[in-house]
Image: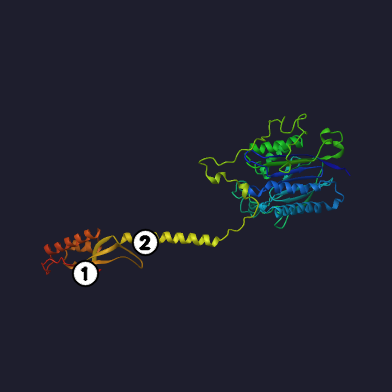
Amino acid sequence: MTSLVLHYSAISDVGRVRKDNQDSGYAGPWLLTVCDGVGGAARGDIASSTAVKALRELDDAPADRGDLLDRVAAGLDAAHLAIGRLVDEEPALNGTSTTATVALFDGSRVGIGHVGDSRAYLYRSGELSQLTTDHTFVQTLVDEGRISPEEAETHPHRHVILRALDGNHDLEPDLFVLEVVPGDRLLLCSDGASGSLRPDRLADILATGTPDYAAVELVRASLEAGSTDNVTCVVADVLDETATADDPSFSDLEPLLVGAASELRRRGRGVSGGMGIFRGHRSGDTGELEPVDAEIPEGVPFAIATDPEAQRYAPRPPRRFAWLSRLLVLAVVVGLLWVATAAAWAWSQRQYYVGESDGQVTIFRGLDAELPGIALSEPYETSDVDVDLLSGFDANEVTEGIDAGDLESARETVQRLAEQQRTEPTAGASTEPTTGATTGEG
């Protein structure tokens, strides 16, 4: 049977925004892996580098072809437990976690292990296939048919993942085997690449050049597409072993450790002569620049500058005394309503109008309006002026209510009506003026 080998490359770039690299990657003759750590104070760089350190123990020729997935599962479990021990030794790291996508080669097959939203792709015969499924909240919405894959690309919660290596929660990796053939090209990448480049763009880049060339171009294209995340790409070609016997680029191939897991830049293995892969490429530099301080510019809303990486993986602890906060909010709202109601009531009690009560012209305090079950006014002073002794016009005005504003104006209105009653009496009515008044409040 034909024996196959991997011709691989790996590159990790901090990107143009972040101050540090949370990604780690590894590529060797038997193992490919990418881990993307949680951001923020929990130190995702430590989580991803710890995971890769444990996983790279898998990079060895398999003794038994039948245990491929068992080895992958054991490697992920070892990485998971290593992070747990790290947190136990350093409680300040509580909450740290990382994704992990692993491809373990045995000469003819690749065992895939996957947790999180880093991805594995297969490029075969001009067609690109996504091998892994993201363990994200947004992916569950896509699976349920609630949003489309296109809508998922811009969903505000697309960074929230549901599974990760954290040494705390139960580990539930996806595990499967892929049969490979000569000419296959594998890509493992963090979401800094897959979240910025559409599948057709990924396929276009993977269709060209060596693994070195493709890896560099993937990183560069991700940054040019606007990725604000770290970008890590591992590319490997599946080749017939006999076809690589006289290939000098293959004979000196060594394992590559990139990102947070390595403090050293890659040396040698350049695309052009002895230069590193960051030089001599068709578009110049990869964009590996000095990181830009992610300060919030003056006048920019906080929501725009907030880093989604800080909220990606670690589950949030429950808020303490949440019931007390709600109670305080309720008390404030009730207090504001009470103050507003008291102010409105006090204002209404300074309003007066002239109306009719039991056939007499009466000064009312309050508002000349009605609400079901609520009295907005009450008699304040009752005069001796009889409504029946007023002219039809005046009587109608009194019945409808005459706005007076303040008490003094109301009393002047009553006095005017008393004078009208005296000078224009109704037939049979007394001509004596009646200007006396009684006060409703005593």
Query: Above or below — where is 308 with respect to 281?
Result: below
Q: Which residue is drawn at 84% across and 53% down?
A: 67
Secondary structure, mark 2, is helix
Q: Looking at the picture, how far across and down is residue 441, in whole percent?
A: 25, 68
Q: Which residue is drawn at 46% across and 61% down?
A: 331
Residue 124, relative to residue 410: is it above or below?
Answer: above
Residue 122 seen from this side: no
Q: Which mark is residue 359?
A: 1
Residue 375, image x and y in percent? 32, 66
Residue furthest to the right: 1
Colour treatment of the image: rainbow
**Could you tell whether 203 is left or right of 393 in the image?**
right
**Which quarter of the rendering shows the N terminus?**
top right
Residue type indicated by callout 2: Ala
Q: Which x, y percent locates residue 74?
A: 79, 53
Identified by mark 1, the residue type is Gly
| Mark 1 vs 2, N-terminal side | 2
Q: What numbered label is drawn on residue 342?
A: 2
* Quarter assignment of residue 260: top right
Question: Comparing marks 1 and 2, which lies closer to the viewer?
Answer: 2
Q: How many angstroms separate mark 1 from mark 2 (CA)?
A: 33 Å
Q: Can residue 246 be seen in this view?
A: yes
